[in-house]
Every structure is written in structure tokens, then in C-alpha cells.
Image (cartoon, rainbow, N blue to C red):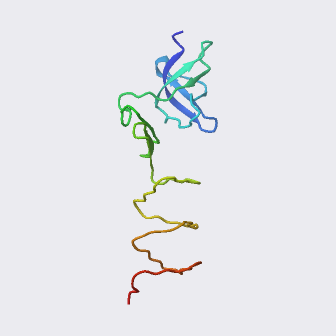
Amino acid sequence: MSDIIRVGYISAINYTDGTAQVVYKDRDNAVSPYMPFFSNEFDPPPVETLVYVVHLENGGTRGVILPPPYAEGNRPPEGVAGIWRKDFGDGSYIRYDKKAKRLDVVSDSVNVEELNVSGNLAVGGNATVTGRISAGSISAKSISTTGNVHVGGNLTVSGSYPT
């Protein structure tokens, strides 16, 4: 029963199969066969990362690799109740605040195939549109264009024409 949960370090990763080998330094550096990760989310830890492995009771050749635990030098990024966060290791992350009901996606670039916004949309930087914009009306302090303007209905102008 004492061999069911073991501590080891990732020694090799098979990215195609989603499996890895684990070296057990407390067992004369014995290396496990390739075993799956205990998750359907694939983000294998780097080689030499501390992991726990749950083995079946019938021997040490079958088991699953648990995600790396938080340990010294590897603490939760925020460590606050009600915050869920997924870090991607390059500074990008997804964060959800349950109390505020707020989802943040922090990355250099985010691609969304389709987006429907039912509330207000605030853009803090430039917006580039490569397709068409459909709207009931558009209000702006000023609108500048460098191309042609086509009006498909009546044109109403208020104010003066600059000279």
C-alpha cells in the first residue's frame, strides 16, 4: 500500500501520446514506463519537474501522473480565495474572479472566431476592422476617412462646412 503514491521527476515526454516517464530518485533513479497525465488538459510540465504519481496496487508499471504540486519556489500566483487562474508559463494567463464575476485574458494576442457582446464594449486602444461594420447608428465626436464615403440613404448635415 505504501507504493501507491510516489514522488518523482519528469524525465521524458511523449507529446504525441500525452504521456511521460518519471524518474524516482529515491529508488536508485528507476524510470517508469510512459504513463498518462491525470487530466484531459494537456500542458505537460518540463523535464525535471517534481510530480506525484498514483500507481495501481498491482505493481509499479501502471499509473497516472498528477499535476505538479505547489512547493517552495512554486506558489500560487495570487493565493487569494475566489480567484481561479491558469498560467501558461510565458506571462499569459486566464483569471476568473468569482466575487466580481470577471474574466481576464492576458496575452500578447487573443483570437476569437466569433464574439457577441450584449452589453457595452469599451476599447482602450485602436480598433482595426478588415470586414464590414453593420450598425443602426454610429455616434462619434469626429469621424475621419481617407477613402470614399458612400451614402445609401438621405444625408442630413447639421452645423457648418469648414472653409
Q: Is residue 88 left or right of residue 76?
A: right
Image point 51% across, 68% down: which residue?
137
Front residue (pair 111, 26): 111
Residue 16 sits in quarter: top right
Residue 113 sits in quarter: bottom right
Q: How many marks?
A: 0
Front residue (pair 85, 59): 85
Image point 49% across, 34% down: which residue?
47
Image quadrant where one finds the C terminus? bottom left
Q: Position of residue 48 (x, y in %)?
A: 47, 32
Q: Is residue 62 left or right of residue 5?
A: right
Image point 61% across, 25% down: which residue?
33
Q: Is residue 74 left or right of residue 138?
A: left
Position of 39 relative to 53 (above/below): below
Position of 12 relative to 112 (above/below): above
- Residue occupying the far bottom of the picture: 163
Q: Position of residue 5 (x, y in %)?
A: 51, 17
Residue 133 sits in quarter: bottom right
Position of 157 relative to 39 (above/below): below
